[in-house]
Amino acid sequence: MLLAASEITRAVDRAFFLIGGVSLLLLAGITVAMVILAVRFRRSRVRTTSQVGGHTVLEITWTVIPTIIVMWMFYVGYGGFALMRQVPKNHMVVDVTGKQWVWSFSYPKERIDASEMVVPVNTPVLVNLTAPPEDVIHSFFIPDFRVKEDARPGQASYLWFESERMGTFSILCAEFCGKDHSKMYTWLKVVSREEYEQWVEKQQMKKFRPLEVGAMMDPNNPGFGKDQLNIDGAVIFGAACVSCHGSAGDGSGLPGQARNMTILKDWKRSAKVTDIYRTLSEGIEGTQMRPYPNLTPWERIAVAHYVRSFSKEPRPEDTLEDCQAMIEEYGLDKVQAPKQTIPIERAMELLVMEAGGRALTGEDALRGVNP
Ligand SMILES: [Cu+2]
């Protein structure tokens, strides 16, 4: 019935069965005593009862014994709770977002995204939880591991687990979150270390796969779609570009400065996909248009197509030679090794550490950024 899959599972079960067992014993004892007393002291047998005023020994007994039992429950329960909150040092990280109505998993170190969770056996996994700010509360629940934690809009929370067994386990949402709440159901696959590494490599191959000229020139490239790379140019634009270029691409985010993309004349480079790729890779010097090295080549291509679609004017088309030249120049015919990105706060911390706590000069900053 209960196949313990982790240390936490055992700790939770211990507390559960202790509290459940004590409750059952009390229920049985109280029920039996009640029935016996009701029969023994029924009205036809006993007319008058003695008046009991106080009984010190009895009162101490029924105070001390329950106190001990409750402290025992607390001790066992707290042990499990402490275990759940202390993530072992050698953990791996999976960022999990709950939104109406799907769980999405991203592996920040491996730089991959997935719709189900795959982890290696015998490895502590830290699950960072959140939900988009405009979403509702969800609750990430893996019944087999007895772990459950809310994913709250715009806030961070976490849980961790470590599986001692390989296998497939359910992941559920345990907070009623609207119409399709019951569809927030997916799988946790615990596999061997080798299988896990193969899986990561496969996902990375998919995401960072070499550019192909034909697919790259096609704005409706099925590779961008849901089943493939799962890249949506509009989503990337919404996340990274709208603040300056405006949602209609008319430059209204940074009026008078960011390029109005509905008009194609005056562009520093052309509006060819390859030229936009160059802008996204190198930025435009001396302006706020910075490079976007965190976007994969395919993401840059997808957002380039999207940006081009703002203009109704005839657009310059890339030739095969343009594409080939670009692929050669940037070495895009090979799988792109994922670059690890770190949050800016962490980067600053590292810089301060490197400088040995001195106040930083501009030179230090440069050295830290381009070692
Ligand atoms: Cu939910």
Image (cartoon, rainbow, N blue to C red):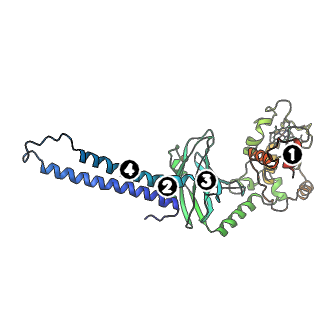
Check if mark 2's residue and mark 3's residue have beta carbons within 8 Å.
no
- Residue type at tag 3: Val
Q: Which residue lies furthest to the front in this view?
A: 56
Query: Nearer the N terminus, badge 1 or badge 3?
Result: 3
Q: Which x, y percent locates residue 45? A: 7, 48
- State the residue at coordinates (86%, 32%): 257
- Residue type at tag 4: Val
- Residue type at tag 2: Gly
Residue receiving disc 1: 364
- State the residue at coordinates (74%, 57%): 207
Q: Residue furthest top?
A: 255
Q: Residues within 10 Å of mark 4 (few under 14, many from 20)?
A: some
Query: Nearer the N terminus, badge 4 or badge 3?
Result: 4
Q: Please name which of the two marks, 4 or 2, marks the residue nearer to the observer.
A: 4
Q: Distance between the residues labelled 4 and 2?
A: 16 Å
For label 2, the SS is helix
When the figure is inspected, residue 249 is found, relative to residue 70, above or below; the finding is above
Residue receiving disc 4: 70
Q: Please name which of the two marks, 4 or 3, marks the residue nearer to the observer.
A: 4
Q: Residues within 10 Å of mark 2 (few under 14, many from 20)?
A: many
Residue receiving disc 3: 127
